[in-house]
Image: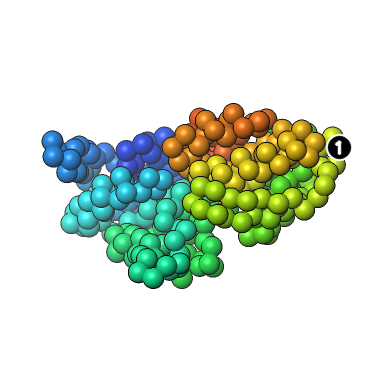
Amino acid sequence: MGRIKEIVFALPGNELLAAHIAASTGAERGSCEFAQFPDGETYVRILSPVSAKRAILVCTLAQPDTKIIALFFLASALRDSKISKITLVAPYLAYMRQDKQFKEGEAVTSRYFARLISGMIDEIVTVDPHTHRNRSLSEIYSISTTVVHAAPLVAAYIAANVAAPLIVGPDEESEQWVAEVARMAGADHIILKKKRISASEVQIEFPVRKIPAGTTPVLVDDMISTAGTMIESIALFGKLNEVKPVCVAVHPVFSGDAFKRLASAGVKEIATCNTINHSSNRIDVSPLIIRAIENE
Ligand code: R5P
């Protein structure tokens, strides 16, 4: 029996990665139309034949509330058109942080969002989701999940572009990941102590009094959202010995003017992975995603 035919659809803004996936896997590029009715409602129409094919939907989920409806309508229309399987490629997976009730009555949105997505599609491929208290995606997603790790690419980027790097993790939680990046980049690492005061405010403590002379600190985090974590750490580096750190992150979420504030906070360079399109993208994670799709 022949391999099931694959067809790749890009949700708006994801055309580049979708084209890359189609070109590398030999899958067909699907065509569909997205539009907005005058009252703000969403219109979706599939323009390619899809019956009995496997659909690969490419939709990174930063700013998820603006994307979820189009994704739901496309997935539903595909089901009605007798698609055999739907894989969602979401290089950034949203709603991972509210994973418990901190105050009575709060919605545990990581669980609810996972339930919503699990009802729409058959499997998901993503990059380094922010699994915090949930140890793995399978604790909250009831569908098949494939997670690819950007650490080898992050380490290779640092090794090739930063002279004498000292890898710096922003908090204890990041220790395992940061140690792995440091090992692969052939560098030492240190871990800062972070206390979160509010969604945008953090307090950082340094474990050392001096950065080894001649080293370039490289702050490595899984995501930059408000940039509070990076900016607070950079200020401490300035106080220690006026070295400008390099900032590297997997997911450039950059809420509001976070990128502008970070860029003017005394940083040598900001380098991110292209899990979300951004001018700071320097590390291409698409080979990891393509390999994961091909292996399924
Ligand atoms: C926290 O657990 C994460 O690893 C990041 O440090 C955090 O999400 C960054 O957020 P922000 O840029 O808002 O400080």
Label 1 C-beta lies within 8 Å of the nearest ligand 1 atom? no
User: Residue 173 vs residue 239: left or right?
Assistant: left
113 w.r.t. 229: above or below = below
User: Residue 72 vs residue 41: left or right?
Assistant: right
- Where residue 111 appears, x then y in whole percent? 39, 66
Judging by the rendered image, the residue that carries numbered circle 1 is: 213
Tell me which residue sits at (66%, 50%) in the image. Answer: 204
User: Residue 138 vs residue 28: left or right?
Assistant: right
Front residue of 265 and 219: 265
Front residue of 126 and 27: 126
147 w.r.t. 58: above or below = below
- Where residue 213 appears, x then y in whole percent? 86, 37
Residue farthest left in this picture? 38
User: Residue 212 vs residue 56: left or right?
Assistant: right
Tell me which residue sits at (52%, 57%) in the image. Answer: 130
Look at the image and tell me whether residue 25 can be seen.
yes
Asked which quadrant contains residue 165, the reply is top right
Q: Amino acid at mark 1?
A: Ala
Quadrant occupied by the N terminus = bottom left
Front residue of 56 and 280: 280
Tell me which residue sits at (17%, 43%) in the image. Answer: 41
Look at the image and tell me whether residue 1 can be seen.
no
- Where residue 148 appears, x then y in whole percent? 54, 54
- Where residue 135 appears, x then y in whole percent? 54, 68
129 w.r.t. 45: above or below = below
Tell me which residue sits at (22%, 55%) in the image. Answer: 76
Kind of element beneath mark 1? loop
